[in-house]
Amino acid sequence: MSPEWRLKYAFPVLSKIPTTIPWHLAASIGRDPYPVRRLTEHFLVKRFEQVFPEATHLAHRQWARAHLAMLAREMMDAAALHRLGQARGPAIDVTGWEHVDALIRRKQGFILVLNHFDRILTSAVALALRGLSLNTLTMPILDNPGLSLAQRDFLLRKVSSFTQIARGEWRTSTEAMRPVYTSLMAGQAWGILADAWSAEFTRMRSHPFLGGYLQLPTGIERLAEATKVPLLHAITYSERADRLRVVVEPVPGGPRQAIDTVVRRLEQDVRARPWAWWHWGQWDQMWHPAPEEESCDAH
């Protein structure tokens, strides 16, 4: 059987079961083949030992397994986006909708800042179900050489489903940005990941993070500065496989200070839930130990 049978068959078939059972089964099926998951678990245990040496080996292993379960459930989410927040689908509790609603009523464009933390799409879907029309800026899919054909097809179906729910436009970071600027100034909202990372990024800035410094792109703050739009920060917390909590927070201050606040909150969340952050595989590229320059802009 094809090693990508999960993408082609398992998750699409599970998405048709009219209960929340698929989200409980997802962790057993896994995002990747079992041998890959074993290697990933071993890698994560070593990474957690490096970053959180004060925690026990048992905690490191539990976090590694929780991380793998989270990735599998996010795949289940992607295969059944239309069921999130609906009857017989995972429940989503939202705190802070009033901050979104106030901007919508004022017809004020804004950036919804997200991170690769927990089940990423949940917050955007939850807000869209409450009335937010959300455009999305992501890394490229079709032009991404690291993706197989099955992965591209799965992600494109995911994007198509999400844009129908969010009633917005999807653009990638390789496309012209002028329409994004125009849209924001016209009162529309865009969801963008603050901790998106690629070795090809050139405009980066360092943020204090877990005892060292995390290098992140400056795109959001430059976009907000140019368009004079506010930022909101949305965070998802998995309470169970079929119950999630979304928190939306205003981020005061100028764009640079706002992103600093977002990263501080991300650090707080990663300390509390190490398993929920996606980027442990890129840790050596994104993070460097102190002492080094606290802030640098590479151009």
Image: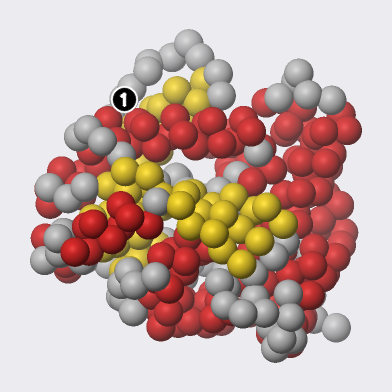
* Residue 27 relative to residue 222: left or right: right
Q: What element carries label 1?
A: loop
Neighbour class for label 1 at 10 Å: few (<14), some, many (≥20)? few
Q: Work out which quarter of the rendered image holds the C terminus and state it.
A: top left
Question: Is 64 or 151 nearer to us in this picture?
Answer: 64
* Residue 206 relative to residue 42: left or right: left
Q: Is 56 located above or below residue 39 in the figure? A: above
Question: Is 248 or 260 nearer to us in this picture?
Answer: 248
* Residue 81 relative to residue 41: left or right: left
Count of marks, rendered view = 1
Q: Residue at x 57, y 54 (%)?
A: 245
Q: Work out which quarter of the rendered image holds the N terminus and state it.
A: bottom right
Residue 133: percent from left, percent from top:
31, 72
Q: Which amino acid does label 1 sit on?
A: Cys
User: Which residue is disc 1 drawn over?
Assistant: 296
Residue 171: percent from left, percent from top:
32, 70
Can I make out residue 202 in this image? Answer: no
